[in-house]
Image (cartoon, rainbow, N blue to C red):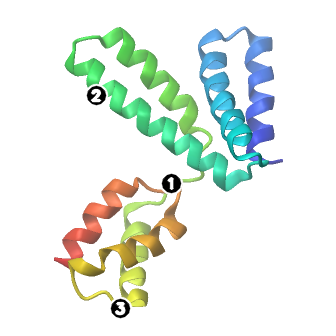
Amino acid sequence: MGLKERVNDEMKAAMRARDSARLSAIRLLLAAIKQKEVDDRVELGDAQVVAIVEKLIKQRRDSIEQFSRAGRNDLAEREQFELDVLATYLPRQADAAEVAGEIDAAIAQSGAAGPQDMGKVMALLKARLAGRADMSAVSAQVRARLS
């Protein structure tokens, strides 16, 4: 079963269970998927759905940070719940040792010698770690290794 079908099935389960908070978060994801399909006139595969989930998670993290700074913990908690629901659709996250190994392999494969080669390394890592690691954290690690 594909990721999109899994999301649809979980939406139906949330409807049956009358779990309105979970249903709202799942509908948000389905709306984003449908919007992308309509805009691009394509049927999305699992990789594209994961990219949408990552984008929505990034938006939730930004919102949580802003709501927390503004003292709106009620809104931050709602965003955190949505983030938790969305995170269930991501593939297994890579651990720190696995990320470090991928960074070493990408640096060796690209022949990177300094910070000017960061783009080459990140292009390789994005393909290998998409959906499995926070790419901003990976980018910081690559920058530190190449400096």
Whichever of labels 3 and 2 marks the residue nearer the N terminus, that label is 2
Q: Is residue 63 left or right of residue 141?
A: right
**Callout in the foreground (2, 1):** 2
Task: Tell me the residue at 36%/9% (across/down).
Answer: 74
| Quarter in which the C terminus is drawn | bottom left
Amino acid at the residue labelled 3: Gly
Q: Which residue position holds label 2? A: 65
* Number of on-image labels: 3
Given contact means CB atoms under 8 Å apart, are the residues at marks 1 and 3 in contact? Answer: no
Q: Quadrant of residue 53?
A: top right
Q: Secondary structure at mark 3?
A: loop
Q: Nearer the viewer, residue 89 or 117?
A: 117
Q: Is residue 38 left or right of residue 73?
A: right
Q: Secondary structure at mark 2?
A: helix
The image shows residue 76 at horizontal and vertical percentages of 36, 18
Q: Which residue position holds label 3? A: 111
How far is mark 3 from mark 2, CA to CA? Answer: 37 Å
